[in-house]
Image (tube, grey):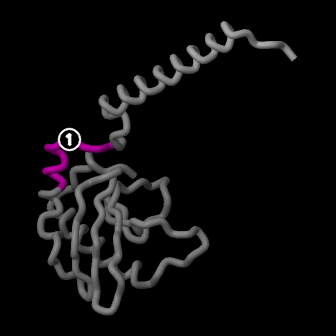
């Protein structure tokens, strides 16, 4: 086994220190440049247009037995709608851009797809209440699309 001298150990220590410093600098530069911003995150104008498109599809709107409790800002390419119904737990649905080659949504419109927002185990069945809520929200969004297609900039498939 080769013996390491004091100079070679000091050299390795300095090399690792320089490598660590380089990684920290690059990580900080990437964070400042917004490299982790979600793909498809729209501009402020596109986000404003998306809110205008949703219009009355907002908190307080009744969707049959369900009502919209909350609508979150676009994040990660989706807008999350929280729906509530009497005797049911709150349900979060993610509205994204429809992708004909993507996963099958719970419900869809001509331009939008609705999915459960939280993680769901692959082998678990979709709760019937989620299908009913997704269909009701999709119907409200279809009515909005009748006036014109939604601005899709802030949404990703």
> In the picture shown, does residue 16 fall above or below 122?
above
Q: Which residues are magenta?
A: 40-50
Magenta includes 146? no
Magenta includes 46? yes
- Residue at 36% across, 49% down: 156
In the displayed structure, does residue 135 sit left or right of residue 143? right
- Residue at 19% across, 82% down: 62
> In the picture shown, does residue 72 fall above or below 41?
below
**Which quarter of the figure has residue 27?**
top left
- Residue at 87% across, 17% down: 1
Q: Is residue 115 visible?
A: no
Q: How many marks?
A: 1
Could you tell me residue 91's position as x and y percent? 35, 76
Q: Which residue is mark 1?
A: 43
Check disc 1 and report its element: helix, strand or loop: loop
- Residue at 35% across, 69% down: 93
Which secondary structure is most common in the magenta stretch?
A: helix
């Amino acid at each position: 086994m080769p013996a390491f001298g004091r100079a070679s150990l000091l050299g390795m220590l300095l090399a690792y220190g320089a490598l660590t410093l380089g990684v920290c600098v690059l990580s900080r530069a990437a964070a400042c440049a917004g490299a982790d911003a979600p793909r498809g995150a729209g501009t402020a104008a596109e986000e404003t247009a998306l809110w205008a498109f949703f219009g009355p599809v907002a908190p307080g709107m009744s969707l049959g037995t369900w009502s919209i409790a909350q609508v979150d800002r676009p994040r990660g390419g989706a807008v999350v709608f929280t729906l509530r119904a009497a005797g049911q737990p709150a349900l979060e649905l993610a509205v994204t851009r429809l992708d004909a080659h993507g996963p099958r949504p719970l419900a869809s419109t001509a331009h939008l797809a609705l999915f459960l927002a939280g993680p769901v185990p692959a082998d678990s069945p979709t709760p019937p209440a989620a299908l009913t809520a997704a269909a009701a929200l999709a119907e409200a969004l279809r009515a909005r699309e009748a006036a014109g297609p939604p601005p899709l900039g802030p949404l990703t498939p």
